[in-house]
Amino acid sequence: MSARASSPRVVTFGETMALFRAREVGSLRHAADVVLGIGGAESNVAIGLSRLGVDVGWLGRVGDDSLGERVLREIRAEGIEVRGILDHEARTGLMVKERPAPASSAVHYYRGGSAGSRLEPDDIPPGWIEEAAVLHVTGITALLSESARACLMAAIARGRAAGVLISFDVNYRSALAPPEVAGPLLRAVADEADLVFGGADELRLLRPGAADPVQELRDGGVGEVVLKRGAHGASVFHSGRTEHIDGLRVDVVDTVGAGDAFVAGYLSGLIEALDVAARLERANICGALACTVPGDWEAAPMRREVARFGRQDVDPVAR
């Protein structure tokens, strides 16, 4: 399975929110200072791809407010083609993150009725998906609202009709829907995808009761299933084969966004027509490096940083 060589680019869309993040470890009830940033699964992937040299586009709705301007500015600054839709009737969503312990995070969302949740099928312009090599979507958009889900399914239908490869990261958020509601909705997306990413619990959510959820996805037509195992590495199931890579040892600061960096690494390898083992290796490095700095996307690596990772001959001090 490979992307079309004639159009080596990825498009993605979804909600990106403003992000307030406490600087110090501990509860927000005692935090003296916070950092303002942005965060969203799809834009995290887009940033990761752009830093790896992939031409990528992102589309989303934001409020006609200063936080919405911040979202669009930050994504554009990463060299991404941004199609920002200003919503004059809703505000930009907000995410608040605290670090109860040095290596753990707690995320709180304030996104009910947000501009990003008001995505609809007409928001995606003609040709934008059809001219891409890969359309990447997540389960977050599928659960945000009925209109966002309709937008997602319409985009997938357009992509499939044009021969665009459909990439789907389950990315289940229990705050958006309980498992019994989310499962069938996310399964409907997975059934239309060529490439599915997910953790073990997420894949079971797609196929509850199945003895082998991965095999059921493969039997349903999914070309590749990527099982993300966090610190334990990852596995790819494809073409009757299974390939596994062990996790990498890094000093973990913040794991939020690591899965998105992993996906960006894998998709960049797909765009470059690397074999599965090489895609998996790059994805593993990207995910590991993303854990070393606070923030959702700030540590997404450049290509040169991926190349330097683990090399014994590299001077740790840049001179």
Image (cartoon, rainbow, N blue to C red):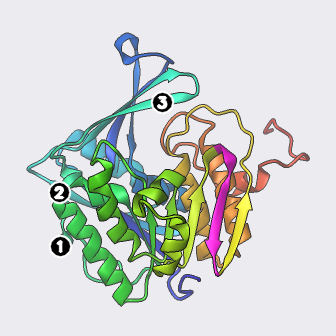
Quadrant of res 19? top left
Q: Position of residue 236 (x, y in %)?
A: 64, 67
Residue found at x 19% / y 51%: 115
The numbered disc on residue 267 is none
Q: Say how many tags the image has.
A: 3
Q: Nearer the viewer, residue 3 or 315?
A: 3
Determine the residue positioned at 42% across, 88% down. 163
Residue 122, label in figure: 1
**Label 3 neighbour load within 10 Å: few <14, some 14-19, many 20+:** some
Name the residue rendered at 44%, 66% in the picture.
Answer: 168
- Which residues lie in the magenta part? 231-239
> Of the residues shown, which amino acid type is indicated by label 2?
Arg
Residue 197: percent from the left, percent from the top? 51, 62
- Pinpoint residue 30: horizontal percent, then vertical percent: 39, 10
| Amino acid tagged 1 | Asp
Mark 3 vs mark 2, CA separation in Å: 28 Å
Q: Which element type, helix, strand or loop, lies under badge 1?
A: helix
Q: How crowded is the residue under tag 1: few (<14 C-alpha within 10 Å), some, or many (20+)?
A: few
